[in-house]
Image (tube, helix red, strand yellow):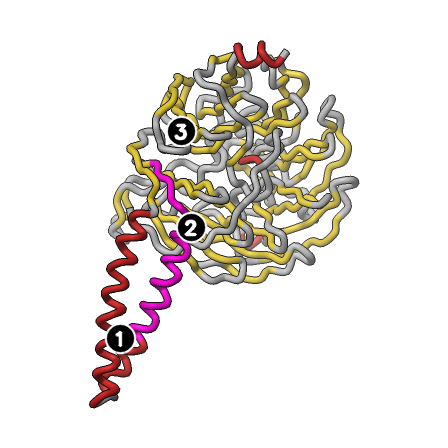
């Protein structure tokens, strides 16, 4: 696998709960929740129907651009992705247009709330409130305890409908989920650039609008992400946009690979996987920092985990950053020297040639050292999703899931599930798996639970 510059700052783990998609506003997919293997299936929920995807998978090949075996990029509603908080599990359904709440311990449904169109994204839970957007163009805030409506807000100014995926949906559906930070819920509405797309910030307490802006040239789709200063908006098969969280001003569109998988590390965004399974990393300022093969990534303080369609690997991040920074500086210097050589003569030319030789030798040493930054690498036949739970990596495959030791990649455990395991979440010693059949599986360790009583 080829790695280029990767400058990802440490990202804190989420707490015990998993209150939003991939655990937090940065979508890191990492939890402190330890899992004691082997796990046992405790319950399965499958009463909400099969997910009704907004978009079919890609064609097998893009012959015009000479790209084969295209990688899916619009994957945000292939399963009922879950959020977990205070012993309850929440998910939105594209099959029955409801927001559901289950008892996380037993799988019993506690309540559900009907919207007027498919709910394609996991809700966000904060302060006893459940916030979710729907294809009807409305953001709903419900009471987590009983599903009672607290407030709802239509993001676009009008309630215009049109047929979409066999349903009546808004001309401005909510297709980016909701991300919450510091009491503010960030949302978008809109799918058709000619009709405009809205980006808005709402007060979690009341639904009141803090700011709202309209743009005529983008189609936001995918889970929103937030860093300290920026809001990142995935844009379907295009590349993400960066907004200022203070006023919603659009700052720039990032270059690189398109796709709706993304994570934030500090103020860098890793996103993709592009048509060919390539990820891009860019800073909030817009500078492209990295390009590498991968479907998913997890970043911790000391290690980055890279997940491709065939492989799982771990990388010593700090050493890698130092080496790749030096490599970049050397390559820049070599370019300057090479350009200047035709204009040099005598001692100056000899000096430049000696420096070029030394830098070439050092670059060779750096390439060897970079390869040694790879802590481990192993074949992984579960390409659909990956999360980190305590000291284990969980990977989703077709009709089963697998756990790997984060320290060395050793396989720890496998278990069957009903369908392709596109959604993984961990909380309080339990693992939750969402599949494209509409099933949600809960795995736990009975002996651990007995010991904790």
Mark 3 and mark 2 residues within 8 Å of each other at the beta carbon: no
Q: Residues within 10 Å of mark 1 (few under 14, many from 20)?
A: some
Q: CA distance from mark 2 to mark 1?
A: 39 Å
Q: Residue at position x 25%, y 70% from top?
A: 358
Q: Residues within 10 Å of mark 2 (few under 14, many from 20)?
A: many
Figure quadrant of the C terminus? top right
The residue segment tinted magenta is: 312-335
Residue 265 against residue 55 in the figure, above or below: below
Q: Is residue 137 left or right of residue 167?
A: right
Q: Nearer the viewer, residue 442 or 52?
A: 442
Give the structural element (helix, strand or loop) at label 1: helix
Give the structural element (helix, strand or loop) at label 3: strand
Q: Is residue 330 magenta?
A: yes
Residue 9 against residue 144 in the figure, above or below: below
N-terminal-most mark, 1 or 3: 1
Q: Which residue is mark 3?
A: 405
Residue 65 against residue 341 in the figure, above or below: above
Q: Residues within 10 Å of mark 3 (few under 14, many from 20)?
A: some
Estimate the x, y position of residue 308 in percent, counting from the top left. Answer: 34, 39
Q: Is residue 57 left or right of residue 218?
A: left
Q: Residue at position x 54%, y 47% from top?
A: 191
Q: Which residue is mark 1?
A: 355
Q: Which residue is mark 2?
A: 258
Q: CA distance from mark 3 to mark 2?
A: 30 Å
Q: Residue at position x 46%, y 56% from top?
A: 282
């Amino acid at each position: 696998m080829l790695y280029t510059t990767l400058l990802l700052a440490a990202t804190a783990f989420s707490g015990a709960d998993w209150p939003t998609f991939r655990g937090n506003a940065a979508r890191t997919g990492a939890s402190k929740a330890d899992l004691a293997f082997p796990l046992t299936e405790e319950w399965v929920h499958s009463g909400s129907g099969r997910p009704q995807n907004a978009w079919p998978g890609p064609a097998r090949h893009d012959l015009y651009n000479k790209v084969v075996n295209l990688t899916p990029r619009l994957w945000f509603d292939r399963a009922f992705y879950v959020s977990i908080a205070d012993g309850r599990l929440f998910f939105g359904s594209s099959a029955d247009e409801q927001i559901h709440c289950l008892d996380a311990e037993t799988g019993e449904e506690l309540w559900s709330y009907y919207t007027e169109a498919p709910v394609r994204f996991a809700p966000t839970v904060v302060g006893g409130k459940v916030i979710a957007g729907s294809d009807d163009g409305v953001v709903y805030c419900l009471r987590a305890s009983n599903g009672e409506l607290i407030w709802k807000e239509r993001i676009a100014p009008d309630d215009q409908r049109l047929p979409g995926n066999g349903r009546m949906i808004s001309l401005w559906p909510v297709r980016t989920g909701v991300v919450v930070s510091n009491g503010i819920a960030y949302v978008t509405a809109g799918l058709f650039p000619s009709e405009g797309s809205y980006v808005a910030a709402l007060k979690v307490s009341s639904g009141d609008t803090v700011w709202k802006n309209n743009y005529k040239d983008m189609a936001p789709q995918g889970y929103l992400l937030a860093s300290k200063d920026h809001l990142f908006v995935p844009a379907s098969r295009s590349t993400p946009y960066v907004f200022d969280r203070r006023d919603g001003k659009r700052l720039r569109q990032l270059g690189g690979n398109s796709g709706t998988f993304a994570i934030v590390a500090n103020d860098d965004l890793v996103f993709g996987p592009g048509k060919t399974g390539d990820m891009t990393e860019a800073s909030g300022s817009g500078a492209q920092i990295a390009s590498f093969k991968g479907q998913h990534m997890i970043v911790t303080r000391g290690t980055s985990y890279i997940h491709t369609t065939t492989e799982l690997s771990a990388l010593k991040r700090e050493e890698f950053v130092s080496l790749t920074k030096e490599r970049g500086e050397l390559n820049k210097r070599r370019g300057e020297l090479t350009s200047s050589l035709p204009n040099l003569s005598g001692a100056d030319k000899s000096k430049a040639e000696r420096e070029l030789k030394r830098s070439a030798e050092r670059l060779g040493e750096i390439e060897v050292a970079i390869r040694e930054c790879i802590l481990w690498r192993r074949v992984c036949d579960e390409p659909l999703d990956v999360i980190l739970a305590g000291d284990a990596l969980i990977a989703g495959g077709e009709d089963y899931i697998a756990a790997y030791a984060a320290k060395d990649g050793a396989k720890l455990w496998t278990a069957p599930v009903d369908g392709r395991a596109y959604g993984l979440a961990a909380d309080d010693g339990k693992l939750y798996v969402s599949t494209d059949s509409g099933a949600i599986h809960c795995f736990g360790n009975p002996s651990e639970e007995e010991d904790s009583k």
